[in-house]
Structure formats: structure tokens, C-alpha cells
Image: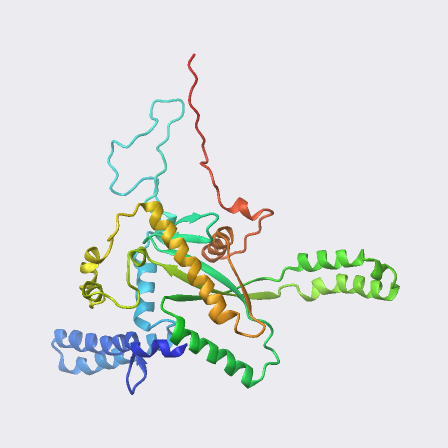
Amino acid sequence: MDELGEESRIPILNIEEGDVYVLLGFPIGGLLFGGLTGLDGAILPFVLFGVIFGGSIVYASPNHISASTWLGDVYRHYCKRPRFTYSTEATAEPTESSTDGGLVSYTPFKPDERTQDLTNIRRAWPGTGAIERSDGAMEAYLEIDPGNMDFAMSGDWAQIQTLGEEFANKELDFTLKFHATTRSFPVEQLIDRIDGRLTDRDVKQNPIFKELLEEYREQRPRDLEGTQQVRYFIGVEVDPFEVYDRYQDEQSPAEKLTSFPVVGFLFNPFVTRRNDMTDAEVRAAMFEKLENRCHGLQTEFIQKAAGWSAHRLTTIELFVLSMDFWNGEEHEYDAAADAVRDHPTIDHQRRADQ
């Protein structure tokens, strides 16, 4: 899978392009700043400071993203996000509706920052196993159970790597996302399973086995206290533009222009909406393409790995997973469907004629 990222690295040096921007940008900035001061002796210290500072940023940046991307994320988090959430927008007109003079005097609460602005999630689509992003793309996820590899030999790991390489080189023609997280070990499920086992006839007829199970039931929850269980996910996505492409294997000249650097997006209107499709038809086509990609991922990669299994997350599970990520805590529901509201908070009805 690492072969997919080789194009973003500088040949011979094997350095990511984003890291090069930081390594060279700060020394050049120090050179320009030292030149502006008019002191020849200050140029070299500023350049050295830029080299040290840029190298420190590259070293401290996360391994899964480049240093330039990480700097951009840090800048947006600390410099562009609002520090306070006000009851009205900063540019709100004084004529905003309020209840001054009524039984209760208050101004409607209209914050200038939405949840969608932070999470990039526009809406969930119950029953489809998909979530719509703010840019219109649909995403679906598979939860992977890779099986126990504690005692796997080098040949077993090599086989998994070979399967991944073959899938990436022969079958993969869309973007994949990998997500890993942890959750508390479901001790309650283990206790319920043991309680159910204690009522079985074979256990009741074997006092020694029953005593061992009861001791295990008392001791095991204490042993598992604080234990985390790792969960692995692979995500696929479908962009609205992909629905309008008639030919996936061979691009037309206009479609090739859309991949041109910097100005390629200007040609998108000329290669999209070849058919007059309604919004519902577009969503249906995107859901179908998501289903095909999830099915291909399962049949061409996951099922070929010995001991591996996967299941597609429902919309409710996707929504709860995103809540866990953004809130930084686990959410437990007696009924998972309670996590997503499927009707307005305030209902309405037609007033009958009096």
C-alpha cells in the first residue's frame, strides 16, 4: 500500500513534498527577513534559525500527514476558529426579530458557527448506510475484524501484504480511508454470555465446571477494567461528479482537462450533468455506487484474507462513531436508533376551523 504514496516524494532524497516546503520555506523566510533588517551579520543567524525551526516542525509533525498540511491544520485551529459563540452573528442587523415587549423578552439564539462547519457532515441517510458530507460526497465504512495475528509467522504477514498490493494495483480505482479507534472492552456482554451459560443443563450437571464459571464471572471483569479494544475501519466515498461519468476507463478530452493542475476545476461544469437527473436520482446512483465499492472491497480483498471478516456500518453506527470522534467520549444507547432523530423536534398540525 505504501507504493501509492511514492508520487508525492522527492526522488533520491525520499522526502515528502510537503516537508520540503517547510524545510526550505523557513530558511528562505529568514534570509528575506535578515535582508530587510539591513544588517549583514543578522542574515546568517536568521537563516540558521529558519533551518532549525523548520526541521523541528518536520520532526514534530504526525507521521500520517506532511508538515505543511499539519501547519495548515494548526493555523486553522488556533487562528481561524472563533473563540466565543455569540447569540447572533457578528454582522447581524439591529432589526433582528426579538420578543421585546412581550411576556418574555429575549433574542433568538443564532450562533455564527454550525456543527457542520466543524465536522463537514451535512446529513445522515438512515437505511442506506451512508453519511453525506458538506461537499455533497457520500461516505460508507466497513468495520474490519482482522482475526488474531498474535502467533502469525512472517509468511502470514507477507500474504496479507501481497493481497493488499494486488487489490490496490488491479482493483482499486477509488479513494480509501483508514480509521482506527479504541473503545472500552464490552464487559457487560461477557457477563451476559456467562450468565446465559450458567443456566445451561450441562453446566448445572457439572458442579465443578459451574463453580469455575462463577469464579471466572467474578474475577474477569476486574481483570478487564480499563482494557481498550481496538476497532479498524475502511471507508469508501462517492463524489457527485462520478455519477455523471459515462466512461470510467477512458476519459474524454474535456475530462482530462479537469485533472489539470490549479485550473482544472474550471472545466468541471463542461463534463458534469450530461443527463438531466433529479437530486433523488443522483442520490440513488451514489448509493448504488457506494454499495458496489463496498461489495468489491469485501470480495476482492477482505474475504481473500484467511480469518478476516467485515460488516458494513449502518447509518446509526456511522453517526455514533462520528459522535465518539468529535466529542472525545463513548456514547452508549439502549436503542441505537435513538442517536438519530427521524422527525422534527417541534411538530405542527393544521388548525381546525372553529
Q: Quadrant of residue 171?
A: bottom left
Nearest the camera: 159 or 348? 159
- Residue 182: percent from left, percent from top: 54, 64
What residue sits 35% from the left and 32% below the top? 107
On screen, residue 262 above or below 9 = above
Q: Quadrant of residue 354?
A: top left
Which residue extends farthest bottom?
A: 12
- Residue 309: percent from left, percent from top: 56, 67
- Residue 12: percent from left, percent from top: 29, 87
What residue sits 38% from the left and 60% below the top? 237
Nearest the camera: 158 or 97? 158
Q: Is residue 178 visible?
A: yes
Nearest the camera: 220 or 308? 308
Q: Is residue 106 left or right of residue 261?
A: right
Which residue extends farthest top?
A: 354
Q: Quadrant of residue 261?
A: bottom left
